[in-house]
Image: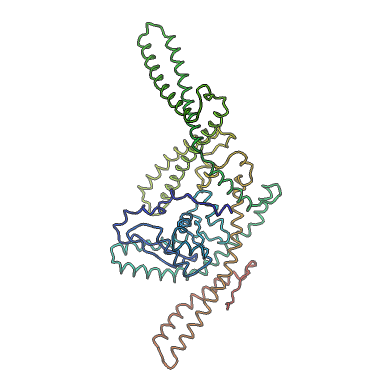
Amino acid sequence: DAIDQIIPDCDDKWKNLSDSTFKSWGQYDETGTVNCYCRHAALFAVCDMVKSGELTKYSFALMHRLLTTFGKGILLGYDIGCGIDVRKNRDPVVGPLADKLGLRCCVGAFHGHAHNRICQLKYLISYIVEAGIDPLETCESAFAVTNAAARAVRYSTAFHRSQLLNELYKHENFHTSYGNISSFIVGKYRQAWKTLASIPEFNAKVRTFNNGAPIDFAQNFKDELTHLLQTKKKTLNEIDELHVQYTQFLDRLWTLETELRTLALEFQATPPHLIILHREIRVAYLAKEEQWQNVLLSVQHHEKKLGIAVPERWTPSSPSYTHAKSLHVHREYLVALTELEGLIVARMQELTKANMSDTGYNQRQKIGQAIKKRSGAVQTAVNRVNRAAKVLWPERPPLEFKEVVNYAFLSEFDFLRATGSGVIDETWAHPIARRLADEYYRIKSAQHELQRLNVETKRLITYMWDEELILKDAERSALDDDKDPLLAFAISRKSRRLAPLHKLHRQRLSKVKTHPWFQGSLEPGI
C-alpha cells in the first residue's frame, strides 16, 4: 500500500524533533514534564525532563509504559507523531514491541496545520476515521492548568516539587477528568449527532458538484496520495541541473552580446569631438566585454561536461533548450512558492502570539507592526508567484492575496506545487471537492465516534455500579465484629464523596437516552 511507504520529512520544521535543540537547558535540574493523557483528559503517565528539552527518549519511555500496560490497539497522538513513528522503529526496545502490538502514531488536528500534505494523508487524525472526532490535543488544555504550578515549584527542592505536582495531578484526575467524564461523553454524542444530521445537506452538495453522480472519496484519497508521491520523486537529476545552468549561461551570454552590439553602435554614432562621452562608452564596452568573456568560459565549461560541440551550441529554437528552459521556469515557480510559504508561516505565528492573553500591550503593538510589514512582503511574494505561474505550461491560475493569507493548512502549498498538467481536471484537485472530502471524513469519524461512545457509556455505568458495590461490601466487612472501624470510616467517607458525583453522571447520561439516535445502553454490564 502506498500510504505505508510514506517517510515523512517534517524534521526540519519541528525543533523538538532535534535532540540537540535544547542543550542549553542542561543548566537546569528539571526543565518540564512530558505528559501522557487519555482522550478524557485523565493523566496516565508523566516523565520529568532532566537537564534537557523534549528529547525522543521521553516519548519512547511513555510508549513503553503504554504498551506494557494496555497492550494492543493504541493510537498515540503527538504534535510530531510522524517523526516519532519513524524513529521508534530504530529503537531496539520500543520498536519490536510497537510492531508486535500495533502501536500507531498520528498528528493532532491543531498541530497538523503545519505538516505537509503527504504527511497529513498518513498521520493527520482527521483522516483516521476509527479514532472518532477527538482532535487528540488534550495536552494543550491540560498544560494551561499545570503551567500555573511553575511559580510554586520554581525554587523548591526536588522532593517538594514532585510532591506538589503529584497532588496536583491527583486533584485534576479526580475533580476535572473523572468529574467531567459524563459531560465529555454527552458533548461528544451531541457533536457526532450534529455532524450526522448534515448528511442530507452533504449529499445534496455532492450531487450538485458532480452533476448528480456520487464521488468516490476513498479513491480520490489514493489518487491524490499517488500523485503527490510521484511529484516528490520528480527532482532534477545531475544532468538536468547542468542543462538548466547551461541555458542560464546561454541567456546571459546572448544578453551581453546584444548589449555589446548596442554599445558599439552608440560608439560609432557619437561625434568624435565628444571625447568624454566616447571614453564613457568605451569603458562600459570593455566592462561588458570582460563579463562576456567570463560567461563564455562558463558556457564552454558546461559544453565540455555535456559533450556539446561549439557548432552544436543550443539556440532558442533547440528542443533541448526548450525542455531545459521549462525545467528552469518550473523550479523558479517552486522557489517563489517556498518563499511565500515561509512568509505565511511567520504571519500565522505572529497572529497567534498577538491573540494570546498573556501578550502585553507594547509587545502586541510591535507584533502588529510586524504583521503589517509582513503583509506587504506577502503581497510581493504573491506577485512573484503569479509572474512565474504565467510562463508555465500549462499556465497556473493566479493567486489572490486574500485567499493566501487565509490559508489554514500549509498543505495548500503542497497542492500548488503538485498542480501540473492534467491535474486541474482531477476531481480531488478541485477546491470544492477538497472541502467535501474533509466533510466526508468528518461524517465517517462521527459514525465511529458513536460506536466508541456506546462502549464508553456502558463502561462508565458498569464502573460506577461495581465501585459502589465493592465499597459497600468492604465497609460491611470492616464493620463486622468491629474489625477495623477506622478503615470502615475511610471507606464510608469515600462512598459519600463519590455518591453525588455518580448521581450527577447518571443525570447527565440520562439526557442522551431520550435521543432518537441513541443506540447505547445505560444498564451496567457484566
The structure residue drawn at horizontal position 42% and vertical position 43%, both measured from the top left corner, is: 371
User: Front-most of 395 and 421?
Assistant: 421
Rendered location of residue 104, percent (x, y): 51, 60
From the viewer's perspective, is 352 left or right of 4? left
> In the image, 191: left or right of 265?
right
Residue found 45% across the figure and 43% down from its top: 342
Task: Kindly indicate the quadrant of the structure image that contains residue 441.
Answer: bottom right
Q: How many marks?
A: 0
Instruction: Using the image as rendered, state which of residue 259 and residue 87 is in the foreground.
Output: 87
Q: How is the image coloured?
A: rainbow
Residue 81 horizontal/vertical position (percent): 47, 56
Q: Position of residue 211 (x, y in %)?
A: 70, 47
Give 520 or 302, whichever is nearer the viewer.
302
**In this rendering, is residue 83 above or below 294?**
below
Image point (44%, 45%), residue name: 347
Classify residue 458 as left or right of residue 377.
right
The quadrant of the picture occupied by the N terminus is bottom right
User: For this rendering, which residue is in front, 477 or 320?
Assistant: 320
Q: Position of residue 15 (x, y in %)?
A: 40, 51
Q: Residue furthest bottom?
A: 481
**Does 79 sit above or below residue 391?**
below
> Relative to residue 132, is residue 333 depicted above or below?
above
| Quadrant of the image containing the C terminus | bottom right
Q: Residue furthest right?
A: 212
